Amino acid sequence: MLSAYLQLELEIQERVVYENDHFVVLVPFWAVWPYETIIISKRHLTSIKYFTEAEIKSLADAIKILTVKYDNLFETSFPYSAGMHQAPVNSGDYPEWHWHMHFYPPLLRSATVKKFMVGYEMLASPQRDITAEFAAKKLREMPQVHYKVK
């Protein structure tokens, strides 16, 4: 399903923040976190152990570009939580699995306004403060070089 979703996003390009030869960085339409992003491998892989040397370099490039864009968004060192999702390793093969990585930054509208999961979001459903399209547009517009300290 993630492979099919990636193809749709590549056709539309509205929520794509950055792409290189091997990875796409985008704000998923289901994002509930401000500036939440996902990096998806273009090649269907189940695990990082199958990455080629070129894919490893491309992943590093995608992470670097994304984190610099985050820093430039509010001109500050931009914190985030991130995690890779790959196929389980102890209960058989999962050929349908498609490797991806999520980023969840806590900054909302400025360098000082933070958002953390609390109360109703933990026990019900997270509340989205901005649309996926708005977040992708803002991140796309950010320079890919480090901001200048004032």
Image: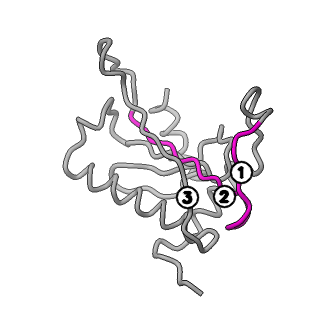
User: Quick check: marks 1 and 2 in contact, CB under 8 Å?
Assistant: yes
Using the rendered view, name the quadrant where residue 60 is placed.
Answer: bottom left
CA gap, disc 3 and disc 1: 11 Å
| Residue 61 pos. (x, y %) | 35, 60
Q: Are marks 3 and 2 in contact (CB under 8 Å)?
A: yes
Q: Is residue 73 left or right of residue 38?
A: right
Query: For the residue carrying disc 1, how many other residues have a C-alpha within 10 Å: few (<14), some (14-19), or many (20+)?
Result: some
Mark 3 lies on a secondary structure that is: loop
Residue behind mark 1: 115
- The residue singled out by tag 3 in the image is 79
Q: Which of marks 3 and 1 is nearer the N terminus?
A: 3
Nearer-N-terminus badge (3/2): 3
Give the residue drawn at x 75%, y 44%.
128
| Mark drawn on residue 107 | 2
Occupied quadrant, residue 42: top left
The residue tagged with tag 1: helix, strand or loop?
loop
Q: Position of residue 141 (x, y in %)?
A: 59, 69
